Amino acid sequence: MSDRILLCGMQFYAYHGVHPEERRLGQRFAVDLEVELDLARAGQSDVLGTTVNYGALYHTVKAIVEGEARQLLETVAEAIAERVLLDYPAIRAVLVRVWKLSPPIAGAVLERVGVEIRRERAGE
């Protein structure tokens, strides 16, 4: 499947991290989301009900990132992928990138660190 809906550069303030300071003070995170689904019907009909509403996808990601604090970016990404596949049956696969902006690494000057995972619906 080559059809995708893309949400890029969503930014949130949350409390994920291994270090106590990260979990107490919080920091900025960014998320990129790509979902694979058949968009032919939506492209032909121009009807929102024939696709997945990207506003709803945004709110799904927001609830997870701004919700329960986790230690690892990997866990945040996995929770997003699981929720997207559970809540949106039309989506066949999901690619999630979670970025920690301005990561607290002693002596390092870098813009961000992140993880990327791709998950498919069982049987795809």
Image (cartoon, helix red, strand yellow):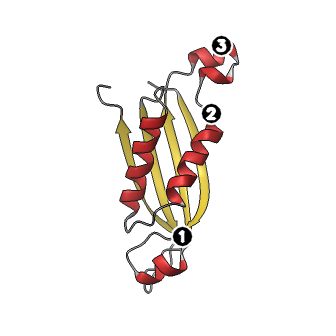
User: In front of the other: label 3 or label 2?
Assistant: 2
Residue at the spot x=42%, y=57% of the render?
A: 76
**Which residue is under mark 2?**
53
Q: Earlier in the sequence, mark 3 or mark 2?
A: 3
Mark 3 and mark 2: span between their CA atoms? 16 Å
Question: Residue pushed farthest front?
Answer: 68
Indicate the amino acid at tag 3.
Answer: Gln
**Sequence order check, earlier mark of 1 and 3:** 3
| Residue that mark 3 sits on | 44
Badge number at residue 92:
none
* Residues packed near mark 3 inside 10 Å, few (<14), some (14 to 19) or many (20 plus): few
Dot 3 falls on a residue whose secondary structure is helix
Q: Which residue is mark 1?
A: 111
Q: Is residue 81 left or right of residue 58?
A: left
* Quadrant of image for the C terminus: top left
x, y percent for residue 26: 54, 75
Q: Quadrant of the N terminus?
A: top left
Q: Which residue is at a point 42% across and 36% down the rendered structure image?
A: 86
For the residues bearing labels 1 and 3, Cβ distance under 8 angstroms: no
Q: Amino acid at mark 2?
A: Asn
Against 103, residue 80 (above or below) is: above
- Residue 70 x %, y %: 40, 65
Question: Three-letter amino acid code at disc 1?
Answer: Glu
Residue at 55% from the left image edge and 59% from the top image edge? 30
Callout 1 secondary element = loop
Quarter-of-image position of residue 82: top left
Count of picture labels: 3
| Residue at (46, 62) in percent of width and height | 68
